Image (cartoon, rainbow, N blue to C red):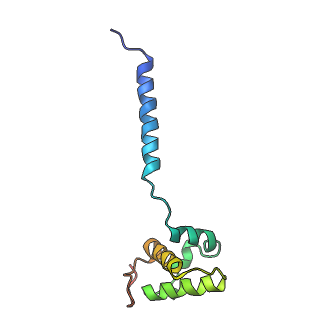
Amino acid sequence: MKASPLLPRLLLALAAAASGSIQAQTAPPPTRGQMLYDTHCVTCHTVQMHWRKSSVVRSWQDLQDQVTRWQASARLGWSQDDITQVARYLNDTFYRMPQTGGVAKRE
């Protein structure tokens, strides 16, 4: 029995479609902190903002204080949980400090 010349193409197309759907499923959804930051903060706060030498963020508490300060300045009315979620997103993305009250060294 002779294989159809379309069979290899069909198998390649199915494999490509399957790998595309697998890749689409592996990206985690954005966190609430990321969505709040991307919606309200990213317009003014670029990546460079978080890596500048004169950063006032030296600890987890500093980071929470700055998020609290700027959300109040923008009159966003975030809950304490929203503030924590945004601080956690920023910490996981940029600062990588222990989430404690003490001073943390940046990596």
Picture coordinates of residue 100, whole percent (x, y): 37, 86
Q: Quadrant of the C terminus?
A: bottom left
Task: Report how many numbered discs are placed on residues in the image.
Answer: 0
Observer-nearest of 65 and 52: 65
Q: Is residue 14 above or below residue 99?
A: above
Q: Is residue 79 above or below residue 12?
A: below
Q: Quadrant of the N terminus?
A: top left
Picture coordinates of residue 82, whole percent (x, y): 53, 77
Picture coordinates of residue 20, whole percent (x, y): 46, 42
* Residue 54 in sight from this viewpoint: no
Q: Residue furthest bottom?
A: 102
Picture coordinates of residue 46, whole percent (x, y): 59, 73
Q: Residue at x 65, y 86 (%)?
A: 73
Indicate left or right for 18 with 32 as reference: left
Q: Residue at x 48, y 59 (%)?
A: 29
Q: Residue furthest left?
A: 1
Q: Residue furthest top?
A: 1
Q: Residue at x 61, y 82 (%)?
A: 71
Indicate left or right for 98 with 75 as reference: left
Q: Residue at x 52, y 78 (%)?
A: 50
* Residue 30 in sight from this viewpoint: yes
Q: Is residue 27 above or below residue 96?
A: above
